[in-house]
Image (tube, helix red, strand yellow):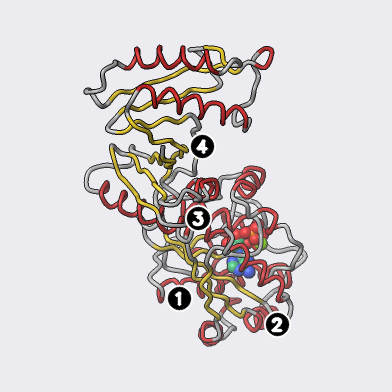
Protein backbone atom coordinates (compact mmCIF):
# COMPACT_ATOMS: atom_id res chain seq x y z
CA UNK A 1 0.00 0.00 0.00
CA UNK A 2 1.17 3.46 -0.80
CA UNK A 3 -0.29 6.69 0.55
CA UNK A 4 -0.81 9.29 -2.14
CA UNK A 5 -2.66 12.58 -2.35
CA UNK A 6 -5.33 13.03 -4.99
CA UNK A 7 -5.82 16.56 -6.28
CA UNK A 8 -8.92 17.64 -8.20
CA UNK A 9 -8.89 20.83 -10.18
CA UNK A 10 -11.45 22.95 -11.97
CA UNK A 11 -12.25 21.77 -15.43
CA UNK A 12 -14.88 24.33 -16.38
CA UNK A 13 -12.27 27.01 -16.84
CA UNK A 14 -10.15 24.73 -18.96
CA UNK A 15 -11.08 25.53 -22.48
CA UNK A 16 -9.04 24.68 -25.56
CA UNK A 17 -5.55 26.07 -25.68
CA UNK A 18 -5.59 27.36 -22.12
CA UNK A 19 -5.71 23.90 -20.71
CA UNK A 20 -2.06 22.83 -21.08
CA UNK A 21 -0.84 26.19 -19.73
CA UNK A 22 -3.24 25.95 -16.80
CA UNK A 23 -2.16 22.41 -15.97
CA UNK A 24 1.54 23.13 -16.30
CA UNK A 25 1.25 26.14 -13.99
CA UNK A 26 -0.83 24.17 -11.52
CA UNK A 27 1.71 21.34 -11.36
CA UNK A 28 4.49 23.85 -10.98
CA UNK A 29 2.66 25.66 -8.16
CA UNK A 30 1.95 22.35 -6.42
CA UNK A 31 5.67 21.58 -6.51
CA UNK A 32 6.48 25.04 -5.18
CA UNK A 33 4.03 24.73 -2.31
CA UNK A 34 5.34 21.29 -1.29
CA UNK A 35 8.96 22.27 -1.69
CA UNK A 36 11.07 21.19 1.27
CA UNK A 37 8.68 18.51 2.54
CA UNK A 38 10.53 15.66 0.83
CA UNK A 39 10.84 13.98 -2.54
CA UNK A 40 7.63 13.47 -4.44
CA UNK A 41 6.50 12.21 -7.79
CA UNK A 42 3.66 14.01 -9.51
CA UNK A 43 1.44 11.94 -11.76
CA UNK A 44 -1.19 13.41 -14.04
CA UNK A 45 -3.97 11.14 -15.09
CA UNK A 46 -7.54 11.64 -16.28
CA UNK A 47 -7.83 15.30 -15.26
CA UNK A 48 -6.45 14.60 -11.84
CA UNK A 49 -3.10 15.00 -10.21
CA UNK A 50 -1.58 12.52 -7.79
CA UNK A 51 1.24 13.38 -5.43
CA UNK A 52 3.28 10.31 -4.51
CA UNK A 53 5.84 10.91 -1.74
CA UNK A 54 8.92 8.69 -1.77
CA UNK A 55 9.37 8.61 1.97
CA UNK A 56 6.95 6.86 4.33
CA UNK A 57 7.46 9.54 6.97
CA UNK A 58 6.23 12.26 4.67
CA UNK A 59 4.16 14.90 6.51
CA UNK A 60 0.86 14.24 4.75
CA UNK A 61 -1.19 16.53 6.97
CA UNK A 62 1.00 19.54 6.32
CA UNK A 63 1.14 18.74 2.61
CA UNK A 64 -2.65 18.60 2.47
CA UNK A 65 -2.97 21.88 4.34
CA UNK A 66 -0.60 23.50 1.86
CA UNK A 67 -2.40 22.03 -1.13
CA UNK A 68 -5.72 23.49 0.02
CA UNK A 69 -4.10 26.91 -0.45
CA UNK A 70 -2.95 26.31 -4.02
CA UNK A 71 -5.29 28.26 -6.29
CA UNK A 72 -6.81 26.09 -9.00
CA UNK A 73 -7.18 23.12 -6.66
CA UNK A 74 -10.82 22.30 -5.94
CA UNK A 75 -10.32 19.56 -3.37
CA UNK A 76 -7.80 17.02 -2.13
CA UNK A 77 -8.11 13.50 -0.75
CA UNK A 78 -5.69 11.32 1.14
CA UNK A 79 -5.75 8.14 -0.94
CA UNK A 80 -4.38 4.65 -0.52
CA UNK A 81 -3.01 3.15 -3.67
CA UNK A 82 -3.20 -0.65 -3.54
CA UNK A 83 -3.04 -3.68 -5.77
CA UNK A 84 -6.12 -4.33 -7.91
CA UNK A 85 -7.02 -7.50 -6.07
CA UNK A 86 -10.27 -8.07 -4.16
CA UNK A 87 -8.60 -9.46 -1.02
CA UNK A 88 -6.23 -6.48 -0.88
CA UNK A 89 -9.12 -4.07 -1.44
CA UNK A 90 -11.09 -5.62 1.43
CA UNK A 91 -8.20 -5.66 3.85
CA UNK A 92 -7.19 -2.06 3.26
CA UNK A 93 -10.74 -0.73 3.16
CA UNK A 94 -11.34 -2.07 6.67
CA UNK A 95 -8.12 -0.50 7.82
CA UNK A 96 -8.93 2.87 6.23
CA UNK A 97 -12.45 3.08 7.63
CA UNK A 98 -11.28 2.06 11.10
CA UNK A 99 -8.68 4.79 10.91
CA UNK A 100 -11.23 7.41 9.84
CA UNK A 101 -13.66 6.39 12.59
CA UNK A 102 -10.94 6.37 15.26
CA UNK A 103 -9.69 9.79 14.23
CA UNK A 104 -13.25 11.08 14.34
CA UNK A 105 -12.69 12.39 10.85
CA UNK A 106 -16.45 12.23 10.48
CA UNK A 107 -18.99 13.38 13.04
CA UNK A 108 -20.84 10.44 14.53
CA UNK A 109 -24.46 11.39 14.52
CA UNK A 110 -26.05 8.01 13.97
CA UNK A 111 -28.19 6.42 16.67
CA UNK A 112 -26.21 4.56 19.34
CA UNK A 113 -22.93 5.70 17.88
CA UNK A 114 -23.42 3.96 14.57
CA UNK A 115 -21.64 5.30 11.55
CA UNK A 116 -23.55 5.17 8.29
CA UNK A 117 -21.68 4.43 5.10
CA UNK A 118 -21.84 3.27 1.56
CA UNK A 119 -19.32 2.08 -1.00
CA UNK A 120 -19.05 3.69 -4.42
CA UNK A 121 -17.01 1.84 -6.99
CA UNK A 122 -15.73 2.90 -10.38
CA UNK A 123 -14.07 0.29 -12.53
CA UNK A 124 -11.80 1.67 -15.23
CA UNK A 125 -9.88 -1.58 -15.55
CA UNK A 126 -12.16 -3.88 -17.51
CA UNK A 127 -9.84 -6.85 -16.92
CA UNK A 128 -10.81 -6.81 -13.26
CA UNK A 129 -13.07 -9.88 -12.86
CA UNK A 130 -15.98 -8.18 -11.01
CA UNK A 131 -18.30 -5.38 -12.08
CA UNK A 132 -18.65 -2.16 -10.05
CA UNK A 133 -21.95 -3.03 -8.30
CA UNK A 134 -20.60 -6.47 -7.38
CA UNK A 135 -17.46 -4.95 -5.92
CA UNK A 136 -19.53 -2.44 -3.88
CA UNK A 137 -21.86 -5.16 -2.59
CA UNK A 138 -19.17 -7.62 -1.62
CA UNK A 139 -16.93 -4.97 -0.07
CA UNK A 140 -19.88 -3.40 1.79
CA UNK A 141 -20.79 -6.77 3.29
CA UNK A 142 -17.22 -7.41 4.33
CA UNK A 143 -16.97 -4.00 6.02
CA UNK A 144 -20.21 -4.58 7.93
CA UNK A 145 -18.88 -7.88 9.24
CA UNK A 146 -15.58 -6.40 10.33
CA UNK A 147 -16.55 -3.00 11.73
CA UNK A 148 -19.55 -3.42 14.05
CA UNK A 149 -20.43 0.31 14.32
CA UNK A 150 -21.07 0.56 10.57
CA UNK A 151 -24.53 0.69 9.12
CA UNK A 152 -25.44 1.01 5.45
CA UNK A 153 -27.24 4.15 4.29
CA UNK A 154 -27.20 4.67 0.56
CA UNK A 155 -29.03 8.00 0.63
CA UNK A 156 -27.26 10.11 3.21
CA UNK A 157 -24.22 8.29 4.60
CA UNK A 158 -21.62 9.86 6.88
CA UNK A 159 -18.87 8.02 5.07
CA UNK A 160 -18.62 7.20 1.42
CA UNK A 161 -15.81 4.84 0.62
CA UNK A 162 -14.72 5.51 -2.93
CA UNK A 163 -13.06 2.64 -4.72
CA UNK A 164 -11.49 3.27 -8.11
CA UNK A 165 -10.23 0.17 -9.79
CA UNK A 166 -7.68 0.92 -12.47
CA UNK A 167 -4.20 -0.49 -13.14
CA UNK A 168 -3.85 0.01 -9.40
CA UNK A 169 -6.80 0.55 -7.09
CA UNK A 170 -7.35 3.79 -5.22
CA UNK A 171 -9.45 3.94 -2.09
CA UNK A 172 -10.40 7.09 -0.22
CA UNK A 173 -13.17 8.65 1.76
CA UNK A 174 -12.20 12.14 2.81
CA UNK A 175 -12.68 14.99 0.36
CA UNK A 176 -11.15 18.16 1.71
CA UNK A 177 -12.28 21.37 -0.01
CA UNK A 178 -9.52 23.66 -1.29
CA UNK A 179 -9.37 27.28 -2.45
CA UNK A 180 -10.57 26.93 -6.05
CA UNK A 181 -9.79 29.75 -8.46
CA UNK A 182 -7.07 29.72 -11.13
CA UNK A 183 -3.38 28.91 -10.70
CA UNK A 184 -1.26 31.90 -9.77
CA UNK A 185 0.64 32.90 -12.88
CA UNK A 186 -2.08 32.13 -15.40
CA UNK A 187 -2.86 35.84 -15.36
CA UNK A 188 -0.76 39.01 -15.47
CA UNK A 189 0.92 40.85 -12.64
CA UNK A 190 -0.83 43.38 -10.37
CA UNK A 191 0.52 45.84 -7.82
CA UNK A 192 -1.36 45.61 -4.52
CA UNK A 193 -1.48 48.65 -2.24
CA UNK A 194 -0.99 46.80 1.01
CA UNK A 195 -1.81 48.63 4.23
CA UNK A 196 -1.84 47.02 7.65
CA UNK A 197 -5.63 46.87 7.64
CA UNK A 198 -8.15 44.10 7.15
CA UNK A 199 -9.19 44.91 3.61
CA UNK A 200 -6.14 45.11 1.42
CA UNK A 201 -4.73 41.61 2.19
CA UNK A 202 -8.16 40.19 1.30
CA UNK A 203 -8.21 42.20 -1.94
CA UNK A 204 -4.77 40.83 -2.85
CA UNK A 205 -5.82 37.28 -2.03
CA UNK A 206 -8.88 37.64 -4.27
CA UNK A 207 -6.78 38.77 -7.24
CA UNK A 208 -4.23 36.00 -6.70
CA UNK A 209 -7.15 33.59 -6.61
CA UNK A 210 -7.98 34.62 -10.16
CA UNK A 211 -4.46 33.74 -11.27
CA UNK A 212 -2.80 37.15 -10.94
CA UNK A 213 0.80 37.44 -9.79
CA UNK A 214 0.99 39.73 -6.76
CA UNK A 215 3.52 42.37 -6.01
CA UNK A 216 2.87 44.84 -3.19
CA UNK A 217 3.62 48.42 -2.25
CA UNK A 218 3.36 49.80 1.26
CA UNK A 219 3.57 53.46 2.31
CA UNK A 220 5.37 54.03 5.52
CA UNK A 221 5.49 57.35 7.41
CA UNK A 222 8.38 56.89 9.76
CA UNK A 223 8.63 58.21 12.52
CA UNK A 224 4.89 58.92 12.58
CA UNK A 225 4.33 55.22 11.98
CA UNK A 226 6.49 52.76 13.86
CA UNK A 227 8.86 49.99 12.93
CA UNK A 228 6.27 47.58 14.30
CA UNK A 229 3.66 48.87 11.86
CA UNK A 230 6.09 47.99 9.09
CA UNK A 231 6.77 44.55 10.59
CA UNK A 232 3.05 43.95 10.63
CA UNK A 233 2.78 44.61 6.91
CA UNK A 234 5.73 42.31 6.24
CA UNK A 235 3.93 39.63 8.24
CA UNK A 236 0.75 40.16 6.20
CA UNK A 237 2.76 39.80 3.00
CA UNK A 238 4.25 36.61 4.45
CA UNK A 239 0.79 35.15 5.08
CA UNK A 240 -0.23 36.08 1.52
CA UNK A 241 2.92 34.40 0.24
CA UNK A 242 1.52 31.09 1.52
CA UNK A 243 -0.88 31.41 -1.40
CA UNK A 244 1.44 32.93 -3.98
CA UNK A 245 4.93 31.61 -3.11
CA UNK A 246 6.79 34.91 -2.92
CA UNK A 247 5.89 38.55 -2.95
CA UNK A 248 8.12 41.43 -3.85
CA UNK A 249 7.25 44.15 -1.35
CA UNK A 250 8.14 47.79 -2.02
CA UNK A 251 8.23 49.90 1.14
CA UNK A 252 7.95 53.55 0.21
CA UNK A 253 8.90 56.35 2.63
CA UNK A 254 5.86 58.61 2.51
CA UNK A 255 6.55 61.10 5.30
CA UNK A 256 7.93 63.95 3.22
CA UNK A 257 5.01 63.85 0.82
CA UNK A 258 2.49 63.79 3.64
CA UNK A 259 4.17 66.68 5.43
CA UNK A 260 4.17 68.73 2.25
CA UNK A 261 0.49 67.99 1.54
CA UNK A 262 -0.38 68.72 5.15
CA UNK A 263 1.49 71.99 4.93
CA UNK A 264 0.17 73.31 1.63
CA UNK A 265 -3.26 71.86 0.91
CA UNK A 266 -6.73 72.46 2.42
CA UNK A 267 -7.34 70.20 5.41
CA UNK A 268 -10.54 68.68 4.05
CA UNK A 269 -8.70 67.59 0.88
CA UNK A 270 -5.67 66.02 2.58
CA UNK A 271 -6.83 62.44 2.34
CA UNK A 272 -7.85 62.55 -1.27
CA UNK A 273 -4.64 64.26 -2.38
CA UNK A 274 -2.61 61.83 -0.33
CA UNK A 275 -4.42 58.93 -1.96
CA UNK A 276 -3.77 60.36 -5.41
CA UNK A 277 -0.07 60.60 -4.54
CA UNK A 278 -0.11 56.96 -3.41
CA UNK A 279 -1.65 55.91 -6.70
CA UNK A 280 0.89 57.88 -8.72
CA UNK A 281 3.77 56.22 -6.90
CA UNK A 282 2.19 52.78 -7.10
CA UNK A 283 1.66 53.24 -10.84
CA UNK A 284 5.31 54.15 -11.39
CA UNK A 285 6.50 51.13 -9.38
CA UNK A 286 3.98 48.95 -11.22
CA UNK A 287 5.23 50.04 -14.65
CA UNK A 288 8.86 49.55 -13.64
CA UNK A 289 8.06 45.99 -12.54
CA UNK A 290 5.76 44.85 -15.33
CA UNK A 291 2.47 45.11 -13.43
CA UNK A 292 -0.48 46.29 -15.50
CA UNK A 293 -3.00 47.17 -12.80
CA UNK A 294 -3.24 48.42 -9.23
CA UNK A 295 -5.29 46.71 -6.53
CA UNK A 296 -6.76 48.28 -3.40
CA UNK A 297 -8.99 47.12 -0.57
CA UNK A 298 -11.51 49.92 -1.07
CA UNK A 299 -15.19 49.24 -0.66
CA UNK A 300 -17.90 51.66 -1.72
CA UNK A 301 -18.94 54.13 0.95
CA UNK A 302 -16.75 52.64 3.71
CA UNK A 303 -15.01 55.96 4.45
CA UNK A 304 -14.92 59.46 2.95
CA UNK A 305 -12.22 58.50 0.46
CA UNK A 306 -14.34 55.64 -0.81
CA UNK A 307 -17.37 57.50 -2.17
CA UNK A 308 -17.91 57.48 -5.91
CA UNK A 309 -16.77 61.13 -6.09
CA UNK A 310 -13.58 60.32 -4.18
CA UNK A 311 -12.84 57.19 -6.17
CA UNK A 312 -13.30 59.22 -9.36
CA UNK A 313 -10.64 61.68 -8.15
CA UNK A 314 -8.31 58.85 -7.12
CA UNK A 315 -8.67 57.05 -10.45
CA UNK A 316 -7.89 60.23 -12.36
CA UNK A 317 -4.41 60.26 -10.86
CA UNK A 318 -3.26 57.28 -12.91
CA UNK A 319 -3.43 55.74 -16.34
CA UNK A 320 -3.85 52.11 -15.51
CA UNK A 321 -6.79 50.11 -14.20
CA UNK A 322 -7.34 50.11 -10.44
CA UNK A 323 -9.00 46.88 -9.34
CA UNK A 324 -11.07 47.00 -6.18
CA UNK A 325 -12.30 43.45 -5.65
CA UNK A 326 -14.07 44.41 -2.40
CA UNK A 327 -16.00 47.31 -3.90
CA UNK A 328 -19.43 45.74 -3.40
CA UNK A 329 -18.74 43.83 -0.22
CA UNK A 330 -19.86 44.44 3.34
CA UNK A 331 -17.21 44.59 6.05
CA UNK A 332 -18.56 41.40 7.67
CA UNK A 333 -17.99 39.43 4.50
CA UNK A 334 -14.48 40.79 4.18
CA UNK A 335 -13.77 39.84 7.79
CA UNK A 336 -14.99 36.30 7.09
CA UNK A 337 -12.49 35.94 4.27
CA UNK A 338 -9.72 37.55 6.35
CA UNK A 339 -10.31 34.91 9.04
CA UNK A 340 -10.38 32.11 6.52
CA UNK A 341 -7.09 33.14 4.93
CA UNK A 342 -5.40 33.78 8.31
CA UNK A 343 -4.72 37.50 7.89
CA UNK A 344 -7.33 38.74 10.37
CA UNK A 345 -5.40 38.29 13.62
CA UNK A 346 -2.42 40.16 12.22
CA UNK A 347 -4.56 42.88 10.62
CA UNK A 348 -6.20 43.82 13.91
CA UNK A 349 -2.91 44.42 15.73
CA UNK A 350 -3.24 48.02 16.88
CA UNK A 351 -0.49 49.85 14.99
CA UNK A 352 -1.09 53.15 13.26
CA UNK A 353 -1.26 53.43 9.48
CA UNK A 354 0.01 56.40 7.51
CA UNK A 355 -3.57 57.21 6.51
CA UNK A 356 -4.52 57.69 10.14
CA UNK A 357 -1.61 59.98 10.98
CA UNK A 358 -2.67 63.05 9.02
CA UNK A 359 -6.42 63.16 8.88
CA UNK A 360 -8.91 65.96 8.74
CA UNK A 361 -11.84 65.98 11.13
CA UNK A 362 -14.23 66.44 8.24
CA UNK A 363 -12.76 65.16 5.00
CA UNK A 364 -14.66 65.99 1.83
CA UNK A 365 -16.95 63.19 0.80
CA UNK A 366 -17.74 64.81 -2.56
CA UNK A 367 -14.48 66.21 -3.82
CA UNK A 368 -14.50 67.88 -7.27
CA UNK A 369 -11.60 66.95 -9.52
CA UNK A 370 -10.86 70.50 -10.80
CA UNK A 371 -10.61 71.76 -7.20
CA UNK A 372 -8.37 68.91 -6.19
CA UNK A 373 -6.10 69.47 -9.19
CA UNK A 374 -5.84 73.14 -8.29
CA UNK A 375 -4.93 72.40 -4.68
CA UNK A 376 -2.44 69.83 -5.82
CA UNK A 377 -0.77 72.20 -8.28
CA UNK A 378 1.11 74.03 -5.50
CA UNK A 379 2.97 70.82 -4.63
CA UNK A 380 6.19 69.74 -6.19
CA UNK A 381 4.78 66.25 -6.52
CA UNK A 382 6.95 64.99 -9.34
CA UNK A 383 10.17 65.62 -7.49
CA UNK A 384 8.82 64.31 -4.20
CA UNK A 385 7.62 61.16 -5.91
CA UNK A 386 10.99 60.61 -7.59
CA UNK A 387 12.73 60.93 -4.23
CA UNK A 388 10.33 58.57 -2.49
CA UNK A 389 10.83 55.94 -5.19
CA UNK A 390 14.59 56.35 -4.97
CA UNK A 391 14.50 55.63 -1.24
CA UNK A 392 12.11 52.71 -1.54
CA UNK A 393 13.18 49.56 0.21
CA UNK A 394 12.52 46.32 -1.67
CA UNK A 395 12.03 43.00 0.12
CA UNK A 396 11.20 39.57 -1.21
CA UNK A 397 8.80 37.88 1.17
CA UNK A 398 8.55 34.09 1.23
CA UNK A 399 6.47 31.71 3.37
CA UNK A 400 7.64 31.12 6.94
CA UNK A 401 9.99 28.11 7.34
CA UNK A 402 7.80 25.91 9.49
CA UNK A 403 4.86 26.53 7.26
P1 LIG B 1 -7.41 48.54 4.87
O1 LIG B 1 -8.18 47.76 5.86
O2 LIG B 1 -6.97 47.70 3.71
O3 LIG B 1 -6.30 49.30 5.50
P2 LIG B 1 -9.18 50.74 5.03
O4 LIG B 1 -10.57 50.35 5.12
O5 LIG B 1 -8.46 51.08 6.27
O6 LIG B 1 -8.40 49.59 4.24
P3 LIG B 1 -8.12 53.10 3.76
O7 LIG B 1 -7.20 53.31 4.88
O8 LIG B 1 -8.91 54.23 3.22
O9 LIG B 1 -9.17 51.94 4.03
O10 LIG B 1 -7.32 52.49 2.57
C1 LIG B 1 -7.93 52.10 1.40
C2 LIG B 1 -6.95 51.31 0.59
O11 LIG B 1 -5.80 52.09 0.28
C3 LIG B 1 -6.40 50.11 1.34
O12 LIG B 1 -7.25 48.99 1.22
C4 LIG B 1 -5.09 49.88 0.65
O13 LIG B 1 -5.26 49.20 -0.58
C5 LIG B 1 -4.64 51.32 0.36
N1 LIG B 1 -3.77 51.82 1.45
C6 LIG B 1 -4.12 52.52 2.53
N2 LIG B 1 -3.05 52.79 3.30
C7 LIG B 1 -1.99 52.24 2.69
C8 LIG B 1 -0.59 52.15 2.99
N3 LIG B 1 -0.06 52.69 4.09
N4 LIG B 1 0.20 51.50 2.12
C9 LIG B 1 -0.32 50.93 1.01
N5 LIG B 1 -1.60 50.98 0.70
C10 LIG B 1 -2.45 51.62 1.51
MG1 LIG C 1 -6.24 51.31 6.28
How far apart, in angstroms, are the residues tagged by discs 2 and 4?
55 Å
Indicate left or right for 57 with 169 as reference.
right
Confirm or deny contact between disc 3 and disc 1 (CB under 8 A). Answer: no
**Residue 326 appears in view:** yes
Mark 4 crowd level (few <14, some 14–19, many ≥20, 10 Å Cα): some
Q: Which mark sits nearer the N-terminus, 4 or 3?
A: 4
Instruction: Give the numbered dot on residue 284.
Output: 1
Mark 1 crowd level (few <14, some 14–19, many ≥20, 10 Å Cα): some
Q: Which residue is drawn at the image coordinates 67% and 82% (left, top)?
A: 264
Instruction: Nearest to the eye among marks 3 and 1: give it.
Output: 3
Indicate left or right for 372 with 26 as reference.
right
Q: Position of residue 281 (x, y in %)?
A: 51, 75
Indicate left or right for 217 with 330 as reference.
left
Mark 2 crowd level (few <14, some 14–19, many ≥20, 10 Å Cα): few
Indicate left or right for 49 with 318 as reference.
left
How far apart, in angstroms, are the residues tagged by discs 3 and 1?
26 Å
Q: Which mark sits nearer the N-terminus, 3 or 1?
A: 3
Residue labelled with disc 4: 176
Q: Which residue is drawn at the image coordinates 39% and 39% (left, top)?
A: 8
Amino acid sequence: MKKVILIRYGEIALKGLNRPTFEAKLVNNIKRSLYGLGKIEIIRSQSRIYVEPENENYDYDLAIEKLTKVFGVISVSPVWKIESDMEEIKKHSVEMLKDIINRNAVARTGAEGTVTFKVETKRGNKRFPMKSPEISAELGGFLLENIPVLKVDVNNPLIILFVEVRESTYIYSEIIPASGGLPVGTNGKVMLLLSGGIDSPVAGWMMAKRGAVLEAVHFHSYPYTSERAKEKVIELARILSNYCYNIKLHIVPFTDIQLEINDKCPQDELTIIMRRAMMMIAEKIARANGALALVTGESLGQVASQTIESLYCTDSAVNMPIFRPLIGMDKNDVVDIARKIDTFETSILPYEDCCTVFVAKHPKTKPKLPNILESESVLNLEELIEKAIEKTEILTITPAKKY
